Image (tube, rainbow, N blue to C red):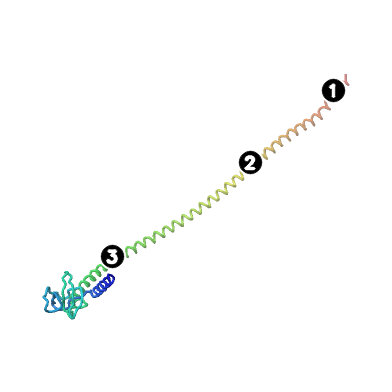
Amino acid sequence: MSSRVSLAVLLVFVVTAASAADRYVSDELSINLRRGPGNDYRITQLLDAGEPVTVIETGDGWTHVRTEGGSDGWVLTRFLSNEPAARTQLAEMRERVAELEQSNASLREELSEALEGSSELGSLKEELIAENKSLKQELSQIKEASANAIRINRENQEFREQILSMESEVERLRHENQALQSRRDGMKVGAIILLAGVLLGLVLPLFRRRSRNSWDSI
């Protein structure tokens, strides 16, 4: 039983929610908001043209509505429209046009600033291009100087190796000269000794002959 009651309440809620919708008072000067669905009911409020209302339920030629102020009542359905009143739409369009004009002015200002910034960017671009060219030239000079430094360093290394080789050769030749000097000194001594021997060989026989002759004369 309780489940059936809950289902019935849910259906009523769905129907009520489905029937709730926004409507607008049509372009009449004003319409009567009554307590019930009929001209016999008392008027509680006058609704101006274009005023939005929320539909609660719809009856036979009458619609139960609620105003933005929270009042509810019944109005003739024929005085309600699905679209806002023309003057309301016109006011909204004018407001929208004003917003667009203001937005357009802002966009024009932004465009002007962008154009000025573009000019500045053009100048900055030229400066950067010139600076880039200068840096490339400087880099090329640095590379050339580095290549020269490497070449000079390689040549210096080769010169050092040649100097070391020449120093080794000089040291070898000095040792050879010392050896030759020693041999030459030895040969000189030998020659002197040989010459002395030869001289002694020639002189001693002469002394012997003189001695013999001296003894013979006695």
Q: Could you tell me which residue is drawn at 67 percent across and 37 percent down?
A: 178
Comes first in the chain, label 2 or label 1: 2
Q: Which residue is mark 3?
A: 113
Relative horizontal placement of residue 143, taking residue 64 as reference (left or right): right
Give the class, few, some or many, for how many residues have Cα within 10 Å of label 1's Cα (few <14, many ≥20): few
Q: CA distance from mark 2 to mark 3?
A: 84 Å
Q: Could you tell me which residue is drawn at 34 percent across and 63 percent down?
A: 121
- Number of the front mark, 2 or 3: 3
Q: Which residue is mark 2?
A: 171
Relative horizontal placement of residue 73, taking residue 124 as reference (left or right): left
- Give the vertical position of 144 relative to 30 (above or below): above
Q: CA distance from mark 2 to mark 1?
A: 59 Å
For mark 1, give the secondary structure.
helix
- Mark 1 belongs to which amino acid? Ser
Report which quarter residue 93 is drawn in.
bottom left
- Give the vertical position of 218 relative to 4 (above or below): above
Q: Which residue is mark 1?
A: 211
Q: Quadrant of the C terminus?
A: top right
Taking depth in this image into account, of 115 and 99 the one nearest to the observer is 99
Relative horizontal placement of residue 86, taking residue 187 as reference (left or right): left
Tell me residue 89's x, y (percent): 20, 75
Tell me residue 45's x, y (percent): 12, 73
* Disc 2 to disc 1: CB gap under 8 Å: no
- Mark 3 belongs to which amino acid? Glu
* Disc 2 to disc 3: CB gap under 8 Å: no
Number of numbered discs: 3
